[in-house]
Image (spheres, rainbow, N blue to C red):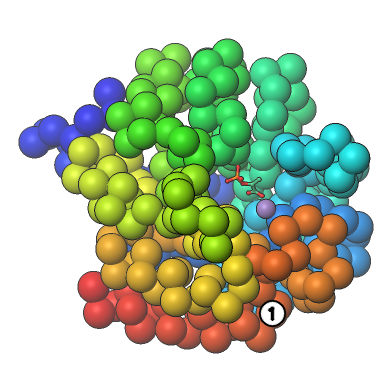
Amino acid sequence: LAARTPERQRTTVDVGGVRIGAEEIVVIAGPCSVENEEQILATAQHVRAAGAHMLRGGAYKPRTSPYAFRGLGEEGLQLLAKAREATDLPVVTEVMTPADVGLVAEYADMLQIGARNMQNFHLLEAVGRIQKPVLLKRGMSGTIQEWLLAAEYILNCGNPNVVLCERGIRTFEPSLRNTLDLGALAFAKELSHLPVIADPSHGVGRRSLVGPLALASLAAGADGLILEVHPHPERSVSDSQQTVDCAEFADIMLRADAVASAV
Ligand code: PEP
Ligand code: MN
């Protein structure tokens, strides 16, 4: 179902009126985590002013350490809904367990399956049984084939609204958080009709490289980007080192438009 065929070259996924996989690239921006009302509203307004099409923000956070900030839960979802009301930006947020799918879907316009859950097959089936668009991140050690088969789980349950996201894989190279696999991004677009976007924030893990890799992703054929943005990145409670500020984001947007129209 995920495979690209002569009859099925490209699919577009509609997220609250924003079409991913169509002519125009789609930029999703926002903080790693929803922290409080002021933070999410300010970020939403800034990224919208800079031209973002959707808002991101985690309410349920998969953290390596159980002692790290793990998200505001339902309160975070409520704040995301408030930010959508204020800015009209559709919202994407992560869902970590089948039990939360109904609740998260009540608030969000798109559900994110995080890298750590790419092969959580019960979760894939749970988001497959509803019609909400799903952003399926590639697992940090997932092969391209495994990633597409994860998408197949969702499609096979009846939800056709799947967008793939390359977010970097773990390689032998320790100096960056991950290795953003642009070959996989381009190949996934060749193998599948589904839209594919890039997450250079998690893909490199380093603020200064987010812009260059965002542009490289678009040049490689990405249908869009998901970027971590915070008014004060140094104060961000999660992923602070890879988060850009609002001015940096606005600069990336200008250059992204130039690259996208050149490809
Ligand atoms: C995130 O988007 O903040 C996140 C946790 O992403 P990933 O699952 O790609 O690590
Ligand atoms: Mn993050």
Residue located 28% across and 63% down the image: 220
Q: Kindly indicate the quadrant of the structure image that contains residue 159.
A: top left
Q: Position of residue 32 (x, y in %)?
A: 71, 56
Comparing 174 with 61, the one in front is: 174
Q: Is residue 208 left or right of residue 217?
A: right
Tag 1 residue: 246
200 versus 72 height, above or below = below
Amino acid carrying label 1: it is: Cys
Can residue 67 be seen here? The reply is: yes
- Residue 27: x, y in percent? 51, 64
Q: In which quadrant of the rendered image does the N terminus lie? A: top left
218 and 168: which one is in front?
168
Give the residue at x 30% y 29%. 145
Which residue is rendered at x = 87% and y = 46% of the image?
69
At label 1, counting other C-alpha atoms closer than 10 Å, the crowd grade (few under 14, some 14-19, many 20 or more) is many
Q: Is mark 1 within 8 Å of ligand 2?
A: no
Q: Quadrant of residue 155?
A: top left
* Extreme-left residue of the structure: 6
